[in-house]
Image: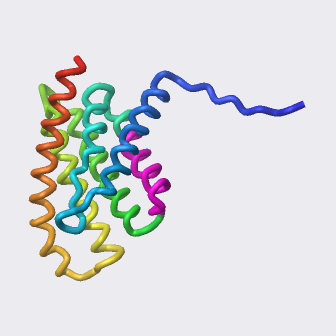
Amino acid sequence: MTDTLQLNTTPDDHRIAWFAALAVVIHVVESALPSPLPGIKPGLANVVTIIVLCKYGWQTAAWVSLLRVLAGSLILGTFLTPTFMLAFSGALCSVCVLYPACRLPGRGFGPVGFSLLAAMAHISGQFFTAWMLFIPHPGIWQLFPVLLSFAILLGVINGIISLHVLKRIK
């Protein structure tokens, strides 16, 4: 007699898996792109997270975001490296900022606002982690305005992309 373990999955589980897989593919492809400055990537996988947030809610988006970082790091061979720690802390900060932003009364934020908030939280979390764990020197904060500016620009661009995708899938 063979004992088998059967997991019962829900449609939400399947949705999370599909969106996480899409985000992981984008994340892996993006990791191969050259960067104009160290630490600057377009963050196109975050478009998937913003679309999921707007369409299915915060919980699903949080799963997609965190699974993307975990699976992406396993595929790229960066799990538990400084790269993983920075990516995970950025994603965690983004998810934490999006939680209250989703619960604002009235119209709240749209895809561009969510993307902008997430991008600013992401780079802030990465800098705090880099400062606390890897480079505990105040000089690191001199780079923060430059990278925050790029994060704001790319956050707006990714938000606009998310907005256009959401309009097309309605």
Q: Does residue 78 belong to the magenta stretch?
A: yes
Q: Does residue 41 belong to the magenta stretch?
A: no
Residue 163, horizontal then vertical, whole percent: 16, 30
Q: Nearer the viewer, residue 132 or 83?
A: 83
Q: Residue at (31%, 45%) from the top-left corner?
A: 95
Q: Is residue 20 left or right of residue 120?
A: right
Task: State whether residue 106 is above or below residue 94.
Answer: above
Residue 92, horizontal then vertical, whole percent: 34, 52
Q: Nearer the viewer, residue 147 or 53?
A: 147
Task: State whether residue 94 is above or below residue 166.
Answer: below
Task: State whether residue 45 is above or below residue 5.
Answer: below
Q: Main secondary structure of the magenta part?
A: helix
Quadrant showing the N terminus = top right
Q: Nearer the viewer, residue 102 or 31?
A: 31
Q: Residue at (13%, 39%) from the top-left corner?
A: 113
Among the 4 quarters of the image, the one containing residue 9 = top right
Residue 86, horizontal then vertical, whole percent: 34, 63
Task: State whether residue 59 is above or below residue 152.
Answer: above
Q: Is residue 109 left or right of residue 70?
A: left
Q: Residue at (15%, 29%) from the top-left corner?
A: 164
Residue 73, horizontal then vertical, whole percent: 44, 56
Q: Residue at (21%, 51%) from the top-left corner?
A: 42
Q: How is the image coloured?
A: rainbow
Give the extent of the magenta segment: 62-79
Among the 4 quarters of the image, the one containing residue 47 = top left
